[in-house]
Image (tube, rainbow, N blue to C red):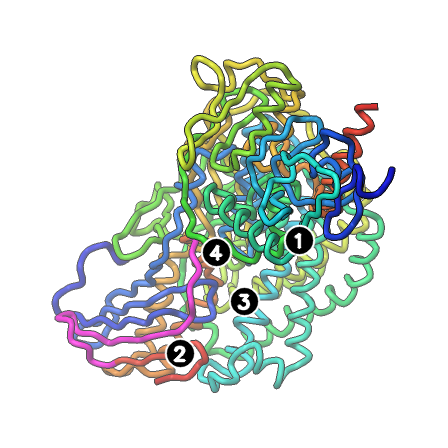
Amino acid sequence: MIAGTNTIYIDGQEIPFTPGQTVMDAALAASVYIPHLCHYPGLPPSGNCRLCMVETGGRNVAACIAQAAAGQEIRNNTPELNAARMAITQMLFVEGNHICPSCEKTGNCKLQAMAYHLGMLDQHFSQFYQHRDIDASHPDIALDRSRCILCDLCVRASRDIDRKNVFAIAGRGIDAHLIVNSASGKLADTPIAATDLAATICPVGAILIKEQGYRVPIGQRIYDRRTICETGLQEHIAQQRRDQ
Amino acid sequence: MESDKPAPPSTRRIAIDPVTRVEGHGKITLLIDDNNHIVEARFHIVEFRGFEKFIQGRPYWEVPFLVQRLCGICPVSHQLAAAKAVDQIAGSRELTPTATKLRRLLHFGQMLQSHALHFFHLSSPDFLFGFGGDPKLRNIAGVLEQFPEIALQGVKLRKYGQSIIEVITGKRIHGTGTVPGGMNKSVTAIERDTLLAGIGDILQWSQDAVALNEHIHTAHPEHRDFGTLPSHYLSMTGTRGELEFYHGGLRARAADGSDIFDQFDYCGYQQILKEEVRSWSYLKFPYFSALGTALGWYRVGPLARINNCDRIITPRAEAARWRFKACGFGGPVHDTLAYHWARMIELLHCAESIHTLLHDPDITGTDLLADKDHRRPQGIGVIEAPRGTLFHHYHVNDEGLVTQANLIVSTTSNNQAMNESVRVVANRYLNGHEITATLLNHLEVAVRAYDPCLSCATHALGKMPLQVTLQHIDGAVIHQLTKKADGVIQ
């Protein structure tokens, strides 16, 4: 491949891409980590979380939905962008009830890991103290909406991989919320199963397999052993293997 | 026994706010009559956190890790009590030997570190420098300066207990470990051997701590009747009456040593215990329901446990118990300051038990989870926490969400006894209408003997300055004394 044709530059590093590939996919394929929460290899991008904002051509774009273009120069790991990412992460924390000390997702939570990655030391913004219902009607799966960050991953996984269309986002802006597609609005009345990707893809503790919490000892949880940069790249490699 | 009624019109009020070197924030009010006789003492607990309310609606398997946040000193006790309740809810009848022994080892580590903290860090300054000693010295920093060997032993004892907690739960404070029906990991051979390398010193220092407390108590006659209070005692004992911290039946003994009940299944605790609410404190007042509020109050914790048990299965602690028992002349030891001595006997028992368990191959086993049958709508977990008998009771709905919770925390059970001890000590040391540093110190020493954890009892944390106010019932302040957080009295 000739540099400058199917090549982009992220923080000066030359990165190849294939036509139609997003900046995020090209970066991950080249083992360059761009922070993200709502991107998942194998699922269509949604551009929801805005953590993957990168700067190119004098404006910010979401790397997960921006198409890579030949010769594009992209700024990713900059103090300004990381400050904006941290502010977004802080907003996600205060908008829900993310009580890390007792949450069963602690150590396995991407939001928590992202906060560590970005050096977040406090929430900065005032806590919303949302009160959202828990749906524990399903025998194997619990849905704690107070932890939902509206990443849309469960919606896409259920619709595009599981082919069950169990979840949806209703409302707009500050009123956006996760709903369950059943007449009762309860998980028990949907075909979701604990083995579905939608039941396990949640990056935070909103969708949980019941009675499995705290089974993994401290020290052996995902982010006890790896950084979110490493797991982000590993997810991409795993998808590449599946594609092959 | 005091009540919720307003103070009689001819009394004055003395307030000590807050009490220091206890875990949390307390305030004492003394109501005195015209003859300067203390007619009532109120140890106010003014914090409120409301764990029983806000765990409602949470999944039951989350509960042990929510409620352990009640406290930073004894989170393991709360986790284990809740875990026992959660085992019942999840349908686990009997844990595997490995899980049971891991929980016991964890609990011994917890008791060891908490007891060491209380005596060496919080209470030893009172005894090493005297109740009226210079406040600038009468703290753990002063002990480190004047009695470095004792202070370092205390620090290392606590560190060792925390090391056990860290090995089993992953963190020294607020780790994980328990899961419904078992544990999430066992001890590795390397971890066991690391702990075994230090147990020799722990045994010796624990024995020395018992000897020190035995000497302090027996060599100072004034300690024998300091806040001494005939009372009933409640504790858990093993099936053969042995000292037991993790699982057993409830035993209550009257002040004369006779049984009130014995080997009572704690799942029926609501049949024998009730709680009274008084408007001036967030801390409830439990009592034996058969005896009523006036006569049914009781004490829990080390003094209750050592008084109530028939034996201790570890030899050094059992020998120490016999020497302790001799002080009761055939009956229970009612000396309030003997709490410290009893606490150190338990410390020694913990050290011996840890030594035994570390040689038990089961703790490195892999069979961590018990079989389960159907889920149950409620669970009750009771253990002996460092400060006394601890009750956790949860109801869950069909979906596994908590609908109701009731916690009777150790310090709650000692509530009335602390008031009584304060009244007894205040009557002895109050001189006229003046609040003196001596009175202030002595009241604190009386309260501190119970090792009250106000954070647990009301689930709150507070600062620790101290204010004493002598106030007439009409509101006029007669005298006031303030001790700041740095120990300076104004």
* Region in magenta: B459-479
Tell me the CA gap for discs 2 and 3: 26 Å
A141 relative to B324, above or below: above
Query: Looking at the image, which residue is at 27% across and 57% down?
Result: B280
| Dots 2, 3 in contact, CB < 8 A | no
Q: Are the residues flagged by discs 4 and 2 from a single subunit?
A: no
Query: Helix, strand or loop at disc 2?
Result: loop
Q: Which residue is mark 2?
A: B484
Amino acid carrying label 3: it is: His
B225 with respect to A31 (left or right) = left
* Residue neighbourhood size for the residue with mark 1, other residues' Cα within 10 Å, grouped as few (<14), some (14–19), many (≥20): some
Q: Which residue is mark 3?
A: B340
| Dots 3, 1 in contact, CB < 8 A | no
B399 with respect to A232 (left or right) = left
Q: How many marks?
A: 4
Amino acid carrying label 1: it is: Lys
Tell me the CA gap for discs 4 and 3: 45 Å
Q: Position of residue B230 (x, y in %)?
A: 40, 61
Q: Which residue is mark 1?
A: B171
Q: Is residue B259 visible?
A: yes
Amino acid carrying label 2: it is: Lys
Res A124 label: 4
Tell which subunit mark 3 falls on: B
Query: Looking at the image, which residue is at 43% across and 76% down?
Result: B485
Amino acid carrying label 4: it is: His
Residue B462 is covered by the magenta coloring? yes
Looking at the rendered image, the quarter that the C terminus of chain B falls into is: bottom left
Q: Position of residue B130 (x, y in %)?
A: 50, 82
Front position among marks 4 and 1: 4
